Image (cartoon, rainbow, N blue to C red):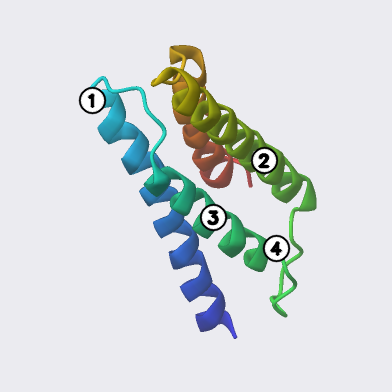
Amino acid sequence: METLRHIVLFVHLIGFAVLFGAWAVEAVNRRYQVTRLMNYGLLVAGVAGLALAAPWGIEYDLNYVKIGTKLLVLIAIGALLGIGSARQRRNGSVPPAIFWSIGVLTALNAAIAVIWR
């Protein structure tokens, strides 16, 4: 069971990497756009994260405050991606504040995962 949990954790990390990597590519190219790949990364990271929050029969207790905080940040990222996509369709670009907030919140979510024990 622990091996399966590690596989789901790996998929969760891949989802984060896709989201942050797609954002970083747009930031480096100064295109300030929301891409479909960012949405896919968010979906993969979110579904795998919810699967990780389930009790897996592990020996230690899960930190539900940390899980809830990460879920709130993930929802905020999703909201910003949705707002950014709508603005992009309407105006052709995403406001820089929304674009940079997506990257900062994505990095914050990873920092919470690594630093908070």
Q: The residue under label 4 is which amino acid type?
A: Ala
**Would you name the residue on which mark 2 appears?**
75
Measure the C-alpha gap from mark 3 to mark 1: 23 Å
| First of labels 3, 2 by sequence position | 3
Q: Residue at x 67, y 40 (%)?
A: 75
Residue 58 sits above or below residue 87 on the image: below
Q: The residue under label 3 is which amino acid type?
A: Leu
Measure the C-alpha gap from mark 3 to mark 2: 11 Å
Q: Secondary structure at mark 2?
A: helix
Q: The residue under label 1 is which amino acid type?
A: Val
Q: What residue occupies the far left of the structure in this picture?
A: 29
Q: Secondary structure at mark 4?
A: loop
Q: Residue at x 60, y 86 (%)?
A: 1
Mark sitting on residue 43 = 3
Displayed quadrant of residue 11: bottom left
Measure the C-alpha gap from mark 4 to mark 2: 15 Å
Marks 3,2: beta carbons within 8 A: no
| First of labels 4, 2 by sequence position | 4
Mark 2, other Cα within 10 Å: few <14 / some 14–19 / many ≥20: some
Measure the C-alpha gap from mark 3 to mark 4: 15 Å
Front residue of this view, candidates 50 and 36: 36
Residue 43 spot, x, y in % from top left: 54, 55
